[in-house]
Amino acid sequence: MSEFTVQKHSPLTSHTRCAHDTLALLGGNDRIACDRLRVHLDFSGEAVVFSRFGAVDPRCYPAGFYLYNPLTTSVYHIDVKVQKFEVKADASSRDLQDVHTTIVVNFSLDGSKCHEVVKTVGTDFAARIILPAVEEVTKASTALFPVEKVIQERPKLKKEIEDGLKVRLAPYWITVQAVSITNISFSHDFSRAIEQKQVEEQNVQRAEFVRQQAQKEGQRQLALAEGQAKANRLLQESLKSSPEVLQMKALDKWDGKLPVYMGSGSVPFIRLEQGK
């Protein structure tokens, strides 16, 4: 069930005033009693529509001073400024998921055609015209998107609703100035599914990060091993080509003491102690 509110930027109250005793018309000699004639004062941002004997006058009067007979004439005060209309509308996505939205429509009435609005629709045009239009256009526009795209492509959804409302309300002399989607929500089950999916995606991303780090570490270790192997191979080749290098390395590590036993094959070499 949709809810709606209509707000005006600065609500104005139209006044009716009359002279204390009598009021002369157009400088004539005839005078009309005050209780038979009223002066209508209309403020800027409003328009007035008169209905005489139930027939709406074929024009919308701008702000100003007007004389009318309250016994025969009804007065309708029409706000022609930009107004705010808010609707909580329910719809379904293309894959039949429930989507709950809050739509705000900024609109204005054609100040030269407000008498037509009064005559064809009445003063409760917001409930009779704008509300069902917003509901229908929102349902039709939301059905164009799968549920996971409703938020991702929010600007496109907003444009679909705005364009649809402009076409729908133009025949009633209502101009749509702007449309805003102030809130989008989903069913409880689907919201939980979205949260679970986000958790799973985060876990997948974390696992991928760990895999990439391990792969980088493996590449680093492989590069080190390859570098060490290459260095050993070069050293081995240099030793084969230059035995003196091996002898020099051995001398570099020798501490100057002869070993107690050293030999090769069956003929050992025994070190004799000096001075015995």
Image (spheres, rainbow, N blue to C red):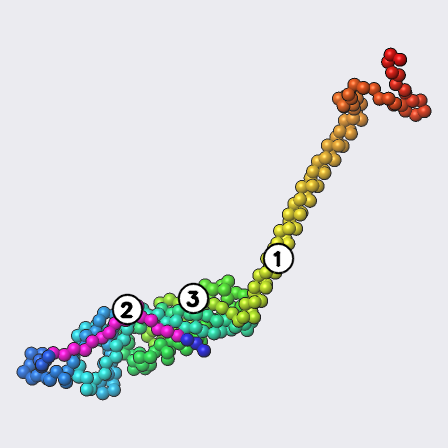
* Membership of 18 in magenta stretch: yes
Residue 56: name its quadrant.
bottom left
* Membership of 254 in magenta stretch: no
Q: Which residue in the rendered view is the most extreme toward the left?
A: 29
Locate residue 78 relative to residue 267 in the image: left or right: left
Q: Which residue in the rendered view is the most extreme toward the front?
A: 276
Mark 2 = which residue? 10
Residue 30: name its quadrant.
bottom left
**Residue interval drawn in magenta:** 4-19
- Which one is earlier in the sequence, the residue at label 2 or at label 3? 2
* Foreground pick, 58 / 37: 37
Circle 3 — which element?
A: strand
Q: Quadrant of the C terminus?
A: top right
Residue neighbourhood size for the residue with mark 2, other residues' Cα within 10 Å, grouped as few (<14), some (14–19), many (≥20): few
Percent from the top left, x then y, of residue 118? 29, 80
- Asked if the residue at tag 1 contacts the one at tag 2, i.e. Cβ–Cβ closer than 8 Å, the answer is no
Mark 1 = which residue? 203
Q: Amino acid at mark 1?
A: Asn
